[in-house]
Amino acid sequence: MELLLQQVLAGLANGAIYALMALAVVMIYQAIDHLNFAQGEMATFSTFIAWQVIAWGQPYWLAFAIAVTVSFLGGIVIDRILFRPIHNAPILGQLVAFIALFSILNSVDGEIWNFTIKTFPTPFGREPLFGLRLISTHEAGMIGVTAVILGLLYLFFRGSRLGLAMRAAAANPDSARLVGIRVGWMIALGWGMSAAIGAVGGMLIAPVVFLEPNMMLGVLLYGFTGAVLGGLSSPGGAVAGGFAVGVIENLAGTFIPYFGRDLKLTIALVLITAVLLVRPSGVFGRTVVSRV
Amino acid sequence: MEQNRRQLLIAIGLGGTALLIPGGARAEKKYDVGASDTEIKIGNTGPYSGPASSYSTIWKCEAAFFRMINAQGGINGRKINFLSYDDAYSPPKTVEQVRKLVESDEVLFLFNTAGTPTNTAIHKYMNAKKVPHLLLATGATKWGDPEHFPWTIGFQPNYQSEGQIYASYILEKHPGGKIGVLYQNDDYGKDYVKGLKDGLGAKAKSMIVMEAPYETTDPTVDSQMVNLKSSGADIFYNVTISKFAAQVIRKAAEIGWKPVHILNNVATSVGITLKPAGLENSKGILSTFWYKDPTDPTWKDDAGYKQWLAFMDKDYPEGDKTDNINAYAYCAAQTLVQVLKQCGDDLTRANLMKQVANLHDLELPMLLPGIKVNTSPTNFYPIKQMQMARFDGERWVLFGPVITGEVSG
Amino acid sequence: MTMPSREATEPLGTARRAAAISRPGARYLSIGAAIAVALVLPSVATNFVIFQLTLVMVYGLAILGLNLLTGFNGQFSLGHSAFYGIGAYTTAILMDKIDLAYYWTLPCSGAVCFLVGVVFGLPALRLQGLYLALASFALAAALPQILKFQPLEPLTGGVQGIVLIKPDAPAGLPLNPDQWLYYFTLAVLLVMLAGAANLVNSRTGRALMAIRDHPIAAAAMGINTALYKTLTFGLSALYTGIAGTLGAIAVQFVAPDSFTFFLSISFLVGLVIGGVASIPGCLVGGLFVLYVPNLAERVSTGLAGAIYGCIMLLVIFVMPSGAAGLVRFARAFATARPAR
C-alpha cells in the first residue's frame, strides 16, 4: 500500500512536469492549430537564460522574471518573424519549420552552454514535505504552481476581454476580424504566453532533472502524450493528461508483472492509445462537429 | 708498386661504393594511405549531438592535445590531422561517417571511436578493410579479440571486469546482502550487469532482488528508485551515466535510502556528477578508478596532474577541469602518441597494429600509480587494472590494492 | 486540424494543366534520362559515393511510403520509423537465423510490414489529425524498447543488434558488393516508383486523394473510406518496410537505437522538402535528408544542428510546397504563357 502511494505521488510529481509542458503545448495549439515541436527547446533556452543571470550573481526572482519576460517577447518575435510569413504554407511545411526551430535551439544551447549538467536552484527548497518522505517541497511546489497557472489562465480566458478576444480569434478567425479583433496579434500573444509558460515549466523542471541542452527531450514526449490524452482543446484536460501520464507510467512499471519493468514506456503509450480509441478527441476534448 | 696501386684502386673502389650506398643502416620510410612525410591522418566518430552529446568533450580534448603536439613539432616531424565526425550515436550514421573517413578522406586509422552499437556496426568493416581500429572509447568486452578481429583493439578496462571487481568486493564484505540494480537499458548498462552477475556466480540469483532498467529518454528515474528501496535491497549497484547518477544519488537521500552504494566508474566525476547530486549525499559511495580524478587534492602537487593542468589551461581552456573525463581523453591521446612514436618512419597499417600490440609497462601522467598500459599480440586489453575508492564527502579516497580485472571475453 | 487540401490540390491542378500542355513525351524523356544517369553513375563514382547514393534511394523509398499515406491519403503518421525498423529487423532475423537469401527477405518483410500497417490502420480509423499522429508516434517511440526486451533477445539480438553480410554480386557479374547493391536497390526502387505512380494515377489513387480532401464527400460518393484508408496504411508500411530491408543490407547492421522516432522526423522533413504528394519529390527528400546534415557539419561541428535548421527554414520560406512545388510552379509558369 505504501508502495502504491509512493508511486502515485512520484507519478504526480513527474506528472506536474508533463502537465506544465502539456499546458504550454495546448496554449499554442489553441492559437495556431499546430503542435509546437520546439516547445521543449524554447523552455530549455529560457532556463539557460535564467541560469546565466544567476551565474552572473543576480538573485533567483530577478532571473525568473527576466527569463519569463524574455521568453514572452521571444515567443512573439518567433511568431512574427518565423511563422507569419509561412502561415499560408501547407501544414506539413509549418511542421517542418517547428522541427527546424527545435534543431536550431538545441544546437545553440549546446554551443553556448556546453553539454555538462548544471544545477538550477529551486525557490521551494528540497525538504521532504511535512517531514514525510513521500514527496519533496519542490515537487509539491511544482504541482501547486501548475494549479495556479491553470487557474490564472481560466480567469484570463473566461473573465477578461483580451482572453475573450483570443478565444474568438482561435475559434473563428474570419468572424473575429469582422468584429475588429486583430487576429494576427492574438496569435502572437498566444505564442508569447505559451513561451512564458514553457519558461516557467523549464525553470521548475530543471532543479529535478538538471539543466542541459537535452533536458526536455523525454519531457516533451510525455508532455505531448499528456496533452493529446487530455484533449487538445482543453487546457485543464491537458494538465490532467500530464498528471495521468506520470501516474500511469509509474504504476505500469511497478505493478505489471513480467513486462512492466522493461516496457514501461511501451505500456504507457499503449494504454494511452487505447484511451484515445475510446475517446478519439482526448478524454476532455470537445469533438469538433464540422458542417458539410 | 703494382701491389700499392692495386690496393689503392681497391680502396678507391670500396670507398666509392660506400658513398653510393644510401644510408643503408637507416630504416626506409614506409607509408600506407593517410600517412606521408608531413602528415598523419587520423579518423574518429562520436556523438556531438543527440542524447549522448555530453561525451563530446573527449574528442574536443583529444583534438586540443594533438594541436599541442603539432605545435611542438609533431611526431617524428609529422603533423597530426585529426578528423572527427558526428555520428549522433546512431549506427547507420557511424557506418556512413567511417566509410567516408576510410574511403573518401583516406585516413590511416581510426582512433577512440565511441559507443558499443556504433563500433559494432563498423567492426567487421574495419577488419575486412584491414584498417586499424584503435583504442575504442567503450568498455565493452568484445574488442580484445586479436584472433578474430586483429585490427581492433580496445582501451579502457572493460565494464564486465569492473562489474566483477564489485562482485568480489560484495562477496567479501557483504556476503549476505541483497542487491538492487539500476541500469541503463543499452549495451553499456547490460555489460556492467553481466559483469556483476558473472562475478557473483552461483549467488547472483539469490543476492540480486531487483533489476530496474531505464531509458535515456526517461526524464527521471524516481519511480525505479522507489521500487528499489521497497525491494528491501541494502546494496545498490548503480549503472547510470552522470545526469541520471546525479538524480539517483539525490533521490536516494531524499527517500531516506542508505544502501551500500556502488557507482560505475563512468559517472564518478566530482564536479559533474557528485556536486550536483550533493556532496553530503554522495558520502560513502564506492567505485573504481584507473586514472586520477582532477578534483582530488591528493594530486595537488603531483607532477602528472600538473602536466595535465598546464595542458588544460593552455590548450583546452574551454574544457571543464572538474570533469574527470578530460583526464581519460588525455590518457587515450598520450597512448596513441606513444604508439605513433614507436612506429617511427614505418607508418604502414600493419606496423601500426604491431606497435599498438607492443606497449610494455607504459606509464602515463594521469594514470593511477601502479597502473600501466600493457599490450601484446595475444593481449588486446591495454588497461586492465583498477583500484577501488570511497567518496568521503570531499574527494575519492583510494583503498585496497590495484586489482587486475579478469577478462571474460 | 485538416490535412493539406486546398494548397495541395491547387498545385496538382496546375500540374495537370501543365502536363496536358507539355508533351507527355517530355516527361518520359526526363525519366529515361534520369534512369540512364543512375545506371551509369557507379562506373564513375567511388564506392563510398555509391554507398551514399544507395542510402539516398533507401530513404527516398521510405519517404515514398510516408507520402502514400500522408501526402496522398491525408493520414498523418509520425510512426514510420517503426515500419522501417520492422522491415529491417525482419530481414536481419531471417538472414541471420535461417540464412534466407537477401532477395527473399524483401517479400517477407514487405508482407510483415503490410500486416502491421493494416493492424495499426484499423483502429487508426477512429483517430484524426494530431491524435493519429500521436498514436503513430507512440508506435515509433515504443519500438526500440520492444526490440531491447529481454525475452526477445535470442531473436533480436537485444541491444547488441544483428550484424549482416553484404551480398556479393551474382556469379559472373564484374561488380563489387557496393555496386551490386546499388543496382539491386535501383531496380527495386524503380519497380516501387512505377507501382506508386500507377496507383496514384488510377481510380484508386483518385479515391485516396478524395478521402484526403473531402472525406465526407468521398463517403457520400460511395467510396469505402475505411477499406481504402486501412489498405493505404498497409501499403505505406510495406513501402517503408522494404526501404528498411534495403537499408539494413546496405548498412550491414541493425540495432534498436537505430530506429528511434528521430528517424520518423527525418522522413517527415524529407517528405516536405521533396514535396508532399509528389512521387519524384521523394528522391529529392532522400537527398536532402542524407546530404544536408553532412553539409551542415562541414560548416561547423558544434552548430551543425543550427545550420541544418536554418537550411530547412530557408527551404520552407522559399518553396513551401517543397521541391516538387517549385517544379510545378516553374512548369506552370513556363507553359502558361502560350495559352494567353
Image (spheres, coloured by chain):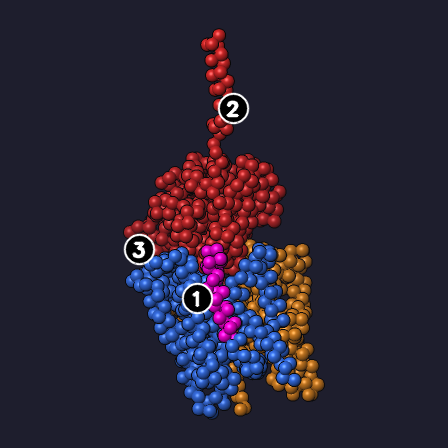
The chain coloured blue is C
**Which stretch is magenta?**
C27-53
- Identity of the amino acid at label 2? Leu
Circle 1 residue = C186
Residues marked 1 and 2 touching at CB (< 8 Å): no
Q: Residue at x 42, y 41 (%)?
A: B350
Depth check, front residue: B290 or C61: C61
- Residues flagged by tags 1 and 3 on a common chain: no
The chain coloured red is B
- Identity of the amino acid at label 1? Leu
- Identity of the amino acid at label 3? Ser
Query: Hey, which quadrant is residue B232 in on the image?
Result: bottom left
| Image coords of residue A222 (percent x, y) | 50, 69
Q: Residue at x 34, y 52 (%)?
A: B197
Which of the marked residues, 2 or 3, is nearer the chain's N terminus? 2
Q: Which residue is drawn at 42% across and 55% down?
A: B121
Cα separation between marks 1 and 2: 62 Å
| Image coords of residue C225 (percent x, y) | 44, 85
Which-is-in-front pick, marks 1 and 2? 2
User: Which chain does the numbered disc 2 sit on?
Assistant: B
**Residue C3 sits above or below residue C38 on the image:** below
Q: Does the magenta stretch include residue C93?
A: no
Q: Does residue A151 appear in the picture of this structure?
A: no
Mark sitting on residue B206: 3
The chain coloured orange is A
Circle 2 residue = B19
The N terminus of chain A: image quadrant: bottom left
